[in-house]
Amino acid sequence: MRTQVEQVAALRRRLPSGGEVPEDYDFDGEQGRVKLSQLFERGDTLIAYSFMYGPKMEKACPSCTSIVDALDGTAPHVVQRANFVVIARSPLPRFLEHAHTRGWRHAKLLSSAGNSYNRDYQAETADGSQMPMLNVFRRHGGAIRHFWGSELLAAKAEPGQHPRHADMVWPLWNLLDLTPEGRGSDWHPKLQY
């Protein structure tokens, strides 16, 4: 399995450049407004997780929260090799309040409340519903291009399967898969226990 995972990663790295990003999106960040092009602080790769917390949602998504709980701890390591941000559609103060309750300290948090990034990169449906999406962008020759996205989310699930497009970055399921009981099919993370 390890060999197959490494082979898939090698194939992914050989993918041709994706489409050029249509605009230099302007986000709200803790340090003020920031453009997509300014997020390439360390190198030419940007990993962007779209967090399901839209302005009409009463609470943040528990599954996305579980994912970012883990990614926040990993962020100081990731930024040694690639830029990393978490983007939510909610206004920044609301997103930061949720982050504070979770103890997030490392991930760069941004609000896309003032732009079309979420809709343009499959993190929001036409009716405004939020979707969890992981996108990777690459800057090359002055242009920013989409490199990869967790598009398995949009694929039809196989019988008895959940789409599980973010499992590879979500330690919870990988850890539970090592147990005799496995992950189970009817349990999901919660915001509080």
Image: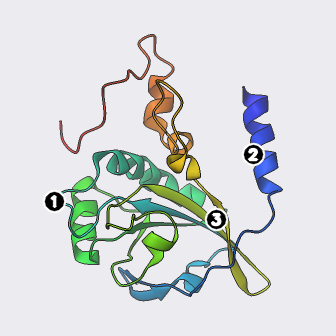
Q: Nearer the viewer, residue 44 or 88?
A: 88
- 73 over 145 or under it: above or below: above
Work out whether mark 2 precedes mark 3 in sequence or the reverse, and give the earlier one: 2
From the viewer's perspective, is 149 left or right of 69? right
Q: Residue 147: where, in percent of width, then height?
A: 69, 65
Image location of residue 66, percent across then percent down: 35, 45
Are the residues flagged by discs 3 and 1 in contact, CB closer than 8 Å? no
Residue 17 on image: x %, y %? 77, 68
**Residue 9 - label:** 2
Residue at 31% over, 25% down: 186
Q: Return the disc, 3 or 1, that comes first in the chain's sequence.
A: 1
Amino acid under disc 2: Ala
At 80% from the left edge and 84% from the top edge, which residue is drawn? 141
**Left or right side of 124 for 101:** left
Element at label 3: loop
For disc 2, the neighbor class at 10 Å (few under 14, some 14 to 19, many from 20) is few
Front label number (3 vs 1): 1
Residue type indicated by callout 3? Ala
Instruction: Find residue 189 and report its image quarter.
Output: top left
Q: Which residue is mark 1?
A: 58
Label number found at residue 82: 3
